[in-house]
Amino acid sequence: MSQHDPKFLPEPQSLRPENLSGRLLSWYDRNRRVMPWRALPGELADPYRIWLSEVMLQQTTVAAVIPYFQKFVERWPTVMDLAQAPLDDVLHAWAGLGYYARARNLHKCAQTVAAWRGGVFPDTEEALRKLPGVGEYTAAAIAAIAFGKPAVVVDGNVERVMARVFAVTEPLPRAKRQIKEHAATLTPRERPGDYAQAVMDLGATICTPRNPACGICPLMAACVGRQLGMAEALPAKEEKPERPTRRGIAFWATRKDGAVLLRRRPEVGLLGGMIEIPSTPWREDKWSLEDALPEAPFQAEWRLLPGLVRHTFTHFHLELVVAAGKIGPAALTRGLWVPLDKLGDHALPTVMRKVVKHALLKAY
């Protein structure tokens, strides 16, 4: 049998929950990261700031989130302020963070909390999960950090720490349930919010994906992965299928005064409700200009600009060719005509800002 067979894994040293959680909390008290949404020692956490930061942090780094978070709380300091904001303003402030469904759900959630609870967030996981855009992880994080409930908080950092400490060899995502069960055994009833943030900080600063600093880790003596010499290989992950490539043609439509045509995407689906440069549907097959003309916003002498706009979404790569054309005096169209110097006032997602940049370089 292999020494990595789970049946033959050694018991971790001193793997008593109170020992490990206490050791980690002591480490956290000395090494906690300072973040604009975190309460200082002795202060009460603000549920609004915790919720906002957790939604922003999904699939995004702390460094990327901090300026967005600060901009949001300066503009909308309470959940009531955010609930009253126009959706387009929220989407515009969100532009660049990606995954725009999060921004729409953020706005819906703020309105729900404002309307149903007068701006007061619920304090249990069960109630929090009923809010728009609040899933299992976010509900647990808010319950633990903002309300001191002993919720089991498991993000990517926590998964990595638990997989290594307990030598979980089953690959993700199949191992998620097992990892959460291990995390539950260590979650203390005292200071659960600090504990949750401590595990996250440990994963972000010491138990890192590559070259973990095991020698200074407060859980070093108990880590089975380290004992087996396999910590850096954990958590194991199933190979992801190769992302397919989709293609389309975007229409850089202008009129005599230089204004550019924008339109809003359907509410449902990728980039739902966002403002875009009009384009064909995105498909695997390449588009010829002739194929794309029925999708154009109006009849014109369209010409293809040289080069491609490339963008990668979670599940596919996108390649867009840009076609430029000017509206004639008799052409009819729907959308919003925007002067070039006002394009920045609209909530264009990153891929559409790439289209704008490409068109400005190639069409003039």
Image (spheres, rainbow, N blue to C red):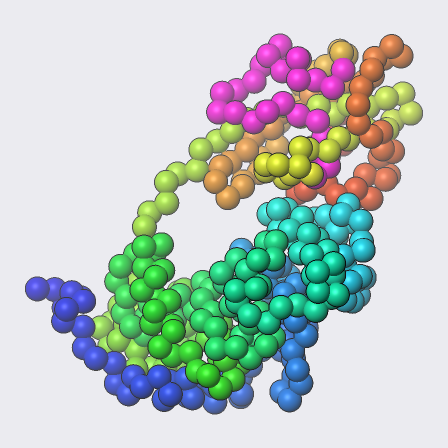
Q: Which residue is located at x 49 percent, y 86 percent?
A: 190
Where's the C terminus, which quadrant?
top right
User: Residue 250 or 13: which is nearer the viewer?
Assistant: 13
- In the picture, measured across the screen, residue 110 lies left or right of residue 309, that is right
48 versus 345 height, above or below: below
- In the picture, measured across the screen, residue 122 lies left or right of residue 88, that is left
Q: Which residue is located at x 74 percent, y 25 percent?
A: 252
Residue 262 in sight: yes
Q: What stretch is highlighted in magenta?
A: 274-298
> Which quadrant would residue 183 be assigned to in this image?
bottom left
162 versus 280 height, above or below: below
Residue 8 percent coordinates (x, y): 14, 71
User: Residue 217 or 69: which is nearer the viewer?
Assistant: 69
Magenta span dominant secondary structure: loop
- In the picture, measured across the screen, residue 243 lies left or right of residue 282, that is left
**Does 286 lie within the magenta span?**
yes
- In the picture, measured across the screen, residue 331 lies left or right of residue 111, that is right
